[in-house]
Amino acid sequence: MTACHAGAPPQTSDAADLSAPAIALVGCPNCGKTALFNALTGSRQKVANYAGVTVERKEGSFRTPAGRPVRVLDLPGTYSLRARSPDEEVTRDVVLGRRGGETAPDILVCVADATNLRLVLRLVLELKSVGTPLVLALNMMDIAKRQGVEINVERLSAELGVPVVPSVAVRRGGTQALLQEIDKLCLGGETLRGSNSWHPLEAGELRALHREAERILKACSFRPADNTLTGRIDRVLLHPVLGTAVLLLILFLMFQAVFAWAEPVMDLIEGSIGDLGALIGGLLPDGLLRSLLVDGIIAGVGSVLVFLPQILILFFFIILLEDFGYMARAAFLMDKIMGGAGLHGRAFIPLLSSFACAIPGVMATRVIDSKRDRLATILVAPLTTCSARIPVYTLIIAAFVPNTTVWGGFGLQGLTMFGLYATGILAALLVAAVLKRLVWREQPEPFLMELPSYKRPSLRNVALGLWQRGTIFLKRAGTIILTLSIVVWFLCTFPAPPADATAPAIDYAFAGMIGHWLEPVLAPIGFNWQIAIALVPGLAAREVMVSALGTIYAVAETGDAAAGALEPLLAAQWSLPTALALLAWYVFAPQCIATLAVVKRETNSWRWPTILFLYMLVLAYTASYAVFHISSALLG
Amino acid sequence: MSLLTNTSSTVRLGGGRRGLRGHVAGLSPVDVSGINRDELERRLIEMGFIEGARIELLHEGPFGRDPIAVRVDDTTVALRRRDANLVIVTVQEG
């Protein structure tokens, strides 16, 4: 907006503006609140979590036409202040000014979808009882006009007793009226705060407020017959057969994109990381510092960084489909299947995302309101087969499963791969069902979800959303992953091998000791000491196991070539039951520090990553044990 | 208690089929789905299921015809049949 403000990083402007009036955006889900927030603040946003909870906190700042600096908080969407999820609790507590660490907002801006006022007017009436100065912003006025919706803004303002301004978040200048109203309310510095008479509403009071809202709506607006475009689209997209087909097609496209589009970029990142490692390796003398930088930090962080393109592509689709209004439809179509496992229909997308990588999957669980449903989804998401398992699966399948066809044309290797994927999905649904039936046995949450009208996504919102997801992944996961990469490097490097060492260096290091120490524990599931050692660096990221095996079996080649050279070696040295047991291990084993780190971030405690690690470990051990002994008996 | 019996003109929303039209007659006073009834009632009201609201059952889920998508006045709401059973609908003939 103003030149002096535009380039300033949010931190400094916030620090300067702490005395500035604070406004909070409140509104029903899908009302275009975030679009309005983006329009007001541009890129001057800070995304973090509220203290002590995993609810996303979005704060930004802007200047009003009068030059007044204003802080603005984008609160989670809600239909009422009667909070029923952690997100809605945050909204209630901030609005009421009783959330620790947050100042009570000076002005509440209730954002409404002008095409659908019915439910939000009740919220406005409820917000009035809080006593904080309130403005109603009728967002998406352009769409409402196009649909023939007429709203008498002055009458509405008079009936509600609050200022009402039209706004169009996605158009330049569309927030002018709102900005002027905020200036007006701020005049005189302090805004007038009335007394707070809010209390949780009982069904009877809700009904009364709803009736009052209906009366006002009838008096102030005219709405033609139903918006037929959304209805027409839904006749296809929610059709039992057609709709399911379209959903599958969209999923297929998403997967195609995640794997095919991301690959060149991933190769580029991988190559650049390799080049960077080589460059630094060339600059520094051979020694510990070089090893730490090249083998520890660059290789470790690089192995996670390489997933950034997949994460961005996945979130591109998720944000686009969410903005379009399709996500609620996907949840509708899949709810029966998810519900069978005790999960919410919305759990479908996070679980799907986990096929690329559990990290975006866990991050995407934020769309699930209910805390328990969300935790259950987070706990089972890592069971779906992520792309990091593919190199390991490919290596072992290529080495042990004959490349023959069975049942008239199906490749046995492909079938094995499919079986591993199917096992992952089944395991995720089964574990979820067990969690919901045995652990969280309280009454199930009702599934009530508005199906919003379809809207054309705004590129700017998608870009901002992607930018935020990307930085969250890099910043939050990055710090923990960096630390753990160094720990794993330390384990694989120290103590140094003796001068007359014959075995690979890793054999003498802590990793080797741990491997040998683990050997008796892992022997019952058919793992030899080489596998046991490779599991240690494999903790950093699953696919690292392949290069670790390369090191241990002293294969000269690296990268993809190592896998090629390893195949005959493994085929000669491992028994088939051992290979199958390792595959079973990889379906379940929690070998991904990055995922555990993100679960820690998202659940805000070490409790859930610990539970995740332990239950997956138990599953992996049991499955490998069963596979090893059953296949030994059958083959023996 | 007359609300609870399925006379010719009132049905539970949870048992409705695609194309059902009518008005909300009320929310059943008894616990019908094994979940916290009062909480469900408040949520239903917040989504617009209130006496007199215009209802049309628009879509049924692809598996077991569950959940259902219901037009409630100007809003479309997806909900499971189990939860929808709380809503009693006066059927509009024709």
Image: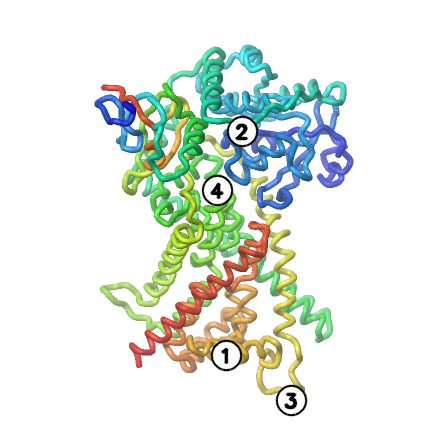
Q: Mark 3 lies on which chain?
A: A
Residue at x 34%, y 24% (from the top left corner): B55
Instruction: Check disc 1 and report the residue beneath it.
Output: A519
The residue lying toward the viewer, choosing from A208 and B2, is B2
Considering the numbered disc 3 on the image, is that residue within a helix, a strand or a loop? Answer: loop
Same subunit: marks 2 and 3: yes
Q: Distance between the residues labelled 4 and 2?
A: 19 Å
Depth-wise, is mark 3 or mark 1 nearer the camera?
1
Earlier-in-chain disc, 2 versus 3? 2
Amino acid type at image mark 2: Pro
* Left or right of A296 in this view: A345: left
Residue at x 27%, y 32% (from the top left corner): B15
Label 1 packing within 10 angstroms: few (<14), some (14-19), many (20+): some
Amino acid type at image mark 1: Glu
As drawn, A395 above or below A110: below
Considering the numbered disc 4 on the image, is that residue within a helix, a strand or a loop? Answer: loop
Instruction: Check disc 2 and report the residue beneath it.
Output: A200
